[in-house]
Amino acid sequence: MKGILKIVTRCVAFLLIFSIIFSNASDYLRRPDDESDEIHAFYDEPKDSIDVLFMGSSPILRGVSPMVMWQQEGFTSYVRASALQAPSVTYGLLAESLEYQTPELVVLLCDNIFLDYNYVEREGDLRRALDGMKMSQHKYKIVREITAADERQTMLSYMFPLFRYHERWKEINWAEAEPSPLMGHSFKKGNVYLRGGEPLEYPTDFMQPSKAVAPEFNENAKEYIEKSIALCKEKNIPVLMIHLPKMAWSYEQSMAMESFAKEMGVEYLDFDREEIRTQLNLDTTTDYYDQGHMNLGGAIKLSQWFADYLDNTYDLPDHREEEAYQKWHEDYQVYAEKAKVE
């Protein structure tokens, strides 16, 4: 009996030491990434403390600032987005998020319904989101779909990123190397803002009706968006589908999205419709980073308008005087200093 106990003890000790070494090696070898960090920092938010979840790809990642919304209206929110986020990843992140939070509203950016998403070509974009996720059934299901489509990508490398990045040891100056663990807490609440940008102009006849036919929905993307909406409905959480400012957009695409939202029984808000663009008062020479994304100045303008709209439409709570949300005031001060918000 003592012999068995000794063997068990040694096995447990080995696994513990291996886990520590494995974790530390991963922290040294992983490529630091703001998007992965922000997705991971979500886990630090206290359970059932987030009022609004923003889900989708880079326009919402860049264009929505939860901190601006907090300062103006007092509701809490978090952006779980990443560049060119696959609809399957959005659904998995949403399903996982709803195990930690019970929001009063889910906002879905659904432009990727027109996108033919190729897992083979988009490994980098996939990993920006998935490297920040904890291991779970949701992550497993996404990775299983990816690896079924691309045999070069493996389940092991997604579950344990060290197996993907192990060759980076050749690039690292070990005398100066420092570990880069995933971020534990975010003062930006998922937002990754952009500075600068080139002066732009709207295309000729932008958002005007034409004889053009809107691109067809990608069936895989449509299926995952439907699943996302159905999941929210099961939990009695309202859904708002949105399109954020993007110059590569058309009236026909907007109308197709509006029709789809009506079929799904959810609201749709298009920030490129003329009446909203007028209210936003975006300056194309200063507020865009590129044709598809707001810069920091544009994101602040957009978030101020959007915060007012969400608060008035969905009667969201104001937590600014609540002691339990004191940390949000502290985070805003850091955000205001870093972003140089006046």
Image (cartoon, grey):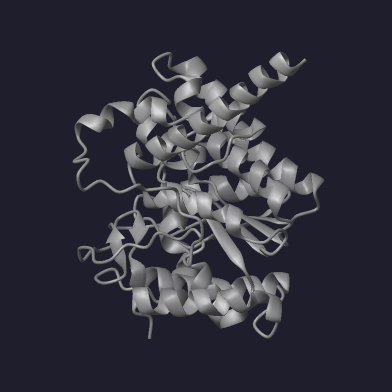
Residue 275 in the image: x percent, y percent?
49, 71
Residue 246 as seen in the image, left or right of residue 104: left
Among the 4 quarters of the image, the one containing residue 197: bottom left
Vertical arrangement, residue 100 with respect to residue 48, above or below: above
- What number of labels is visible? 0
Residue in the picture at 53% in, 57% down: 79
Please tell me which residue lies in front, 28 or 163.
Answer: 28
Q: Is residue 70 above or below residue 89?
A: below
- Which residue is more in the foreground, 340 or 174? 174
Residue found 25% across the figure and 46% down from its top? 177
- Which of these two is toward me, 279 or 45? 45
Q: Residue at x 53, y 68 (%)?
A: 66
For the C terminus, the image quarter is bottom left
Residue 226: image location, x then y, percent: 66, 38
145 displayed left or right of 96: left
Q: Is residue 278 visible?
A: no
Q: Quadrant of residue 201?
A: bottom left
Residue 248 pos. (x, y %): 35, 50
x, y percent for residue 174: 22, 40
Direction from residue 95 to residue 294 in the image, left or right: left
Q: Nearer the viewer, residue 125 or 303?
A: 125
Residue shown at 35% from the left, 69% from the top: 296
Q: Do we see residue 187 in this rendering?
A: yes
Q: Quadrant of the N terminus?
A: top right
